[in-house]
Amino acid sequence: MPVTNETEKKKVIFSAIQPSGTITLGNYLGALRNWIGLQDEYDCVFALADLHTITVRQEPAKFRQNTLEAYALLLACGIDVEKSLFFIQSHVHTHAELAWILNCYTQFGELSRMTQFKDKSAKHADNINVGLFAYPSLMAADILLYQADMVPVGADQKQHLELSRDIAQRFNGLYSPTFTVPEPYIPQTGARVMSLQDPAKKMSKSDENVNGWVAVLDKPEDILRKFKRAVTDSDGRIAYGPGKDGVNNLMGIYSCITGKTNAQIEAEFDGKGYGDFKTAVAEAVIAHLTPIREKFTQYIADKAYLEQCYTKSAQQALAVSNRTLRKVMKKIGFIPKPF
Ligand code: TYM
C-alpha cells in the first residue's frame, strides 16, 4: 500500500453498494470491511447506489426504508463521515448526467458481454430494461467523477471495473487526459464468499434459499442455524483443497474474521469434526457482528442524524464531482452551463 505523508495528496478511493434490502456477510467481507480500513490513509468517497437499485423493480415504501437502513448499517460498520464522504447516489445529480454522457462512449457490444447483465436478465426476464443494460456506464460515472485511484470491491465487480478503465482510457485518448484510470482493489480473502447451501454460487441476497446467505443483521440464533446447515462434503477433514468448496468457503470466512491462516485453522481443528468447526465459524461471525447490530439499532433510531450526515456528504460530493463534469462537458464542446 502506498505511503502518504501530510504534504502529499492522498489517493482517492471510491466504492458503492446497492441498498437493495439485505446486506450480506459476502458484501461485508468482500467490500465493506475493507472500506472501513482505508479511511485513514486515503480520501474515501462512498455511496449507496440507489440509482442502480431501480434496474430491478422496487416497492416505494420498502425501497425508502431499505436505503435508510443501509445508510445506518454502514455507519454502524464503521464508515466515519468526519473522514469520508458517504452519500446517497440519487442526491448527487452529476452521477446521472455523466452516466448519460458515458453511454455515448460505451459500445453496445461491450455492455452485451457483461456477465452480470446476462445473469440478471435471465433472472428478471419480464423486465430487461435499458437501465439494467447500461448499469456499468453508471458505475463508471460514479468512479470517474471523483478521479478515483482505487475501487475496493468483491471479485464479482471486476469485469465492470475493467469496463470503467476502458471508458476512461477511451475518453482520455479522444480528448486529452481527463479521468484518472482506476485500479480495482480486490481483497486476498473474502473476495468471493460463496452460498452456504451451494458453494459453487456466490453468496447473494437474491438467493431464494435463505439458508444460503447470512445477513449482517441476522439474529445470532439464525446465524448459528445457517452455519450448522452449511453444505460440506463426506471427507470429514477440515483442510483446504480441491473438491472441498463448502469447507474452503467456511475456512475463508473464518480466516477473514479471525485473521488466521489456513494452516492455523487446519491445526486448530485437527481431529475435530465438521459440527465443531461450523459452530466455531458461526460463533466467530456472531461475535464480530453483534456490536455492529447494536450500533445499527442506535443509528436507525436517529433519523435526524442520518439526514444530517447524508446531506453534508452529498453537498461536498456535488462540489467535487461538478468539477469533473464541467471539464468533461467543455472538452466535448457543450456550451458552458450558465448556472
Ligand atoms: P453490490 O451492492 O451487489 O455489492 C456491494 C459489494 O459487495 C461485494 N460482494 C461480494 N463480495 C464477496 N463475496 C460475495 N458473495 C459478494 N457479494 C457482493 C461486491 O463485489 C461489491 O463490492 N454495482 C455495484 C455497486 C456500485 C459500485 C459502483 C461499486 C455502484 N457503483 C462504483 C464500485 C464502484 C453493486 O451492485 O454492488
Image (spheres, helix red, strand yellow):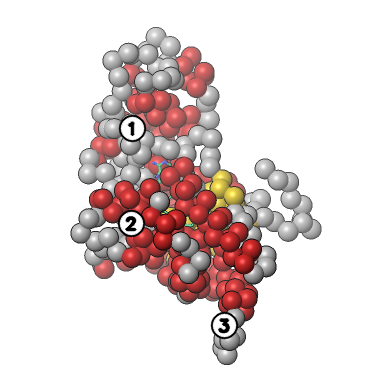
Q: Which residue is at a point 43% across and 45% down the rendered structure image? A: 156
In percent of width and height, residue 259 lies at 53, 30
Vertical comparison of 289 with 198: above or below: below
Q: Which residue is at a point 22% across and 55% down the rendered structure image? A: 125
In percent of width and height, residue 299 lies at 42, 58
Disc 1 from disc 3: Cα separation = 49 Å
The image quadrant that residue 319 belongs to is bottom right
Q: Nearer the viewer, residue 194 or 180?
A: 180
Disc 2 is placed on an element classified as: loop
The answer to whether any part of residue 167 appears in the image is yes
Q: Is residue 104 shown left or right of residue 23?
A: right
Q: Nearer the viewer, residue 242 or 268?
A: 242
In percent of width and height, residue 119 lies at 31, 48
Q: Quadrant of the C terminus?
A: bottom right
How many neighbours does mark 2 have within 10 angstroms: few (below 14), some (14-19), or many (20 or more)? many
Q: Is residue 119 shown left or right of residue 285?
A: left
- Dot 2 or dot 1: first in sequence order is 2
Observer-side mark, 3 or 2, equals 3
Q: Is ligand 1 less than 8 Å from the beta carbon at label 2?
A: yes
Q: Residue furthest bottom?
A: 338
Mark 2 residue type: Ser
Disc 2 from disc 1: Cα separation = 23 Å
| Residue 334 circle label | 3
Vertical comparison of 117 with 176: above or below: above
| Residue 200 circle label | 1
- Asked whether the residues under the numbered discs 1 and 3 touch, taking CB atoms below 8 Å apart as contact, a structural biologist would say no
Observer-side mark, 2 or 1, equals 1
Q: Quadrant of the N terminus?
A: top right
- The residue pinned by badge 2 equals 20
- Dot 1 or dot 3: first in sequence order is 1
In percent of width and height, residue 127 lies at 24, 61
- Asked whether the residues under the numbered discs 2 and 1 touch, taking CB atoms below 8 Å apart as contact, a structural biologist would say no
